[in-house]
Amino acid sequence: MSSPFFKKALCGALLATVVATPAMAQTTQTDTTASDFSFSANMTLASQYRYRGLMQTNNKPAIQGGFDLTHSSGFYIGNWNSSISWLGDANDNVSAPVEMDFYAGYTGPLWGDVTFDVGVLQYYYPGSYPGGFVSPNTTELYLGLGYGPVSFKYSHAVTNLFGWADSKNSQYYDLSASVPTGVWGLNLDAHVGYQRVRNVKDGSYTDWSLGVSKTWGNFTASLMYIDTNADKAVYTSTATGRYQGKAAALLSLTAAF
């Protein structure tokens, strides 16, 4: 079925052709009509990958990247990818070195300077798994609100959460802020989140981070301190013996195109 966005774009193109035809008979003009769609991409090199405070690459570097297609109405779709090792680190019989995220949503003004963002996000981990392994693939619905430099986002899992059995309807609460400091063009970035994992004893935890970032041209550098209070008995890898929620510093460099 055709997307309504593409139908709108097609109708607009046909209308422009009909209106412009008489003028084109007299003189050739350059079409300066701006597209309703915009495309952007990004690439990141990071000292490690942390998600919701937990190790994803066993304290090793990660390469990440993605793209977004947005419409002037506020609708968007996108994809983001990262190297990972946490699944193989937890089970030698698993081979799943990549995380692929697919999302779609709508964002716009809500009231005054308050904005909203609503959508769906699919975390996909292609690879090979042993029989009986609970799939780590996860789908979440999310609702976000923003006001100036502050944002709040609520995510709700409509599947099991990242391989935890019987964890459907788990939730994550994310409060973040990025405030210009007025010094050397630095932003102060702060975050606190709470991951509630349903039906997993001592699986719920809080994560937080604090750091600085600076953007120049198409590049952004970030240095963050990340920590959690995740239970060590639950979040220590049986294969590596490493605690996934241990405090760490993370350095990253992102290029936007």
Image (cartoon, rainbow, N blue to C red):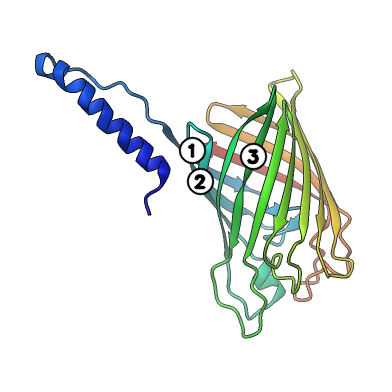
Helix, strand or loop for disc 3: strand
Q: Quadrant of residue 179?
A: top right
Among numbered discs 1 and 3, the one appearing first in the sequence: 1
Question: Foreground: 69 or 228?
Answer: 69
Q: Where's residue 25, x and y in %? A: 10, 18
Which of the marked residues, 3 or 2, is nearer the chain's N terminus? Answer: 2
Report, in whole angstroms, how far the alpha carbon at label 1 lies from the one at label 2.
7 Å
Q: Earlier in the sequence, mark 1 or mark 2?
A: 1
Figure quadrant of the N terminus: bottom left
* Residue indicated by mark 3: 117
Residue 19, quarter of picture: top left
Determine the residue positioned at 37% across, 42% down: 6
Which residue is painted at 70% across and 22% down in the image?
Answer: 112
Q: Which mark is residue 70?
A: 1
Q: Is residue 148 left or right of residue 5?
A: right
Residue drawn where x is 66% and y is 70% of the image: 87
**Amino acid carrying mark 2 in the image:** Ile
Q: Specify the amino acid type for callout 3.
A: Asp
The dot on residue 177 is none
Provide the secondary structure element on which disc 1 rests. strand
Instruction: Please give left or right for residue 27 compared with residue 72 in the image.
Output: left
Which numbered circle lies on residue 77?
2
Q: How many angstroms separate mark 1 from mark 3 (CA)?
A: 13 Å
Residue at the extreme top of the image, as rendered: 26
User: Among all residues in the image, which is located at the extreme left?
Assistant: 25
Q: Position of residue 27 (x, y in %)?
A: 13, 14
Q: Are the residues flagged by discs 3 and 2 in contact, CB closer than 8 Å?
A: no
Near mark 2 (Cα within 10 A), the count class, few <14, some 14-19 or many ≥20, is some
The amino acid on which the numbered mark 1 sits, given as a three-letter code, is: Thr
> Badge 3: few (under 14), some or many (20 or more) residues near its Cα, within 10 Å?
some
Q: Is residue 119 left or right of residue 152?
A: left
